[in-house]
Amino acid sequence: MQIGVFNGVNLDMLGKRNPEIYGGISYGELETRIYAWAAELGCSARCKQTNHEGELVENLHEARSWAEGIVINPGAWTHYSYAIHDALELFDVPIVEVHLSDITRREEWRRHSVIEAVASHRVMGEGPDGYRRALSILTGTE
Ligand code: DQA
């Protein structure tokens, strides 16, 4: 199973940005863990991070030809990007929305997700391990 793991705006700053909220590991370390978890769960992951909304949209369009499952943490775009919502709507494979922090327990503006409506599952507040959980949901090994 081929899984596309997409991280959006500011997630390249992991480890430097509010480590008490998002954890102390870097984005590179997160990718390393995701590839190891994928191998352990018997699937193949392709990770991409971008700070450009249009690039994420194009990456999602491209993934339509190969992805059998999607894991996405859009960062702040979660809360207002209908463009990313619409790009995700084009998939007929399962989509897991992941957040390192529990957005339902943070500032009011973070509690609403425009992605939620197109996500088959949501994982939040589990830090980096949430990505492992997302992969296990998609591979049916939870
Ligand atoms: C986040 C939560 C968002 O509100 C925030 O803008 C992020 C990261 C999370 O993983 O907890 O960039 O998606």
Image: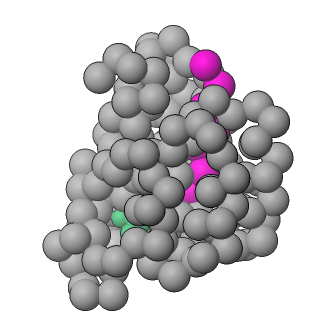
Seen at 33% across and 34% down, the residue is: 133
Seen at 60% across and 76% down, the residue is: 82
Residue 77 image point, x, y percent? 54, 75
Residue 58 image point, x, y percent? 81, 59
Quarter of the image with the C terminus in it: top left
Q: Give the vertical position of 104 relative to 42 (above or below).
A: below
Does residue 42 appear in this view?
yes
Give the main secondary structure, helix, strand or loop, of the magenta stretch: strand
Is residue 27 found inside the magenta-colored segment of the image?
Answer: no
Position of 77 with respect to 66 (left or right) is: left
Which one is nearer the viewer's eye here, 68 or 107? 68
| Residue bounds of the magenta highlight | 1-7
Does residue 17 appear in this view?
no
Which one is nearer the viewer's eye here, 52 or 134? 134
Residue 131 image point, x, y percent? 41, 41
Which one is nearer the viewer's eye here, 29 or 127? 127
Seen at 50% across and 33% down, the residue is: 34
Quadrant housing residue 88 = bottom right
Seen at 29% across and 55% down, the residue is: 124
The residue furthest left is: 105
Quadrant housing residue 21 = bottom left
Q: How is the image coloured?
A: one colour
Query: Quick check: which quadrant has ligand 1?
Result: bottom left
Quadrant housing residue 7 = bottom right
Q: How many numbered tags mark residues here?
A: 0
Is residue 6 found inside the magenta-colored segment of the image?
Answer: yes
Quarter of the image with the N terminus in it: top right
Q: Give the vertical position of 131 relative to 24 (above or below).
A: above
Position of 93 with respect to 34 (left or right) is: right
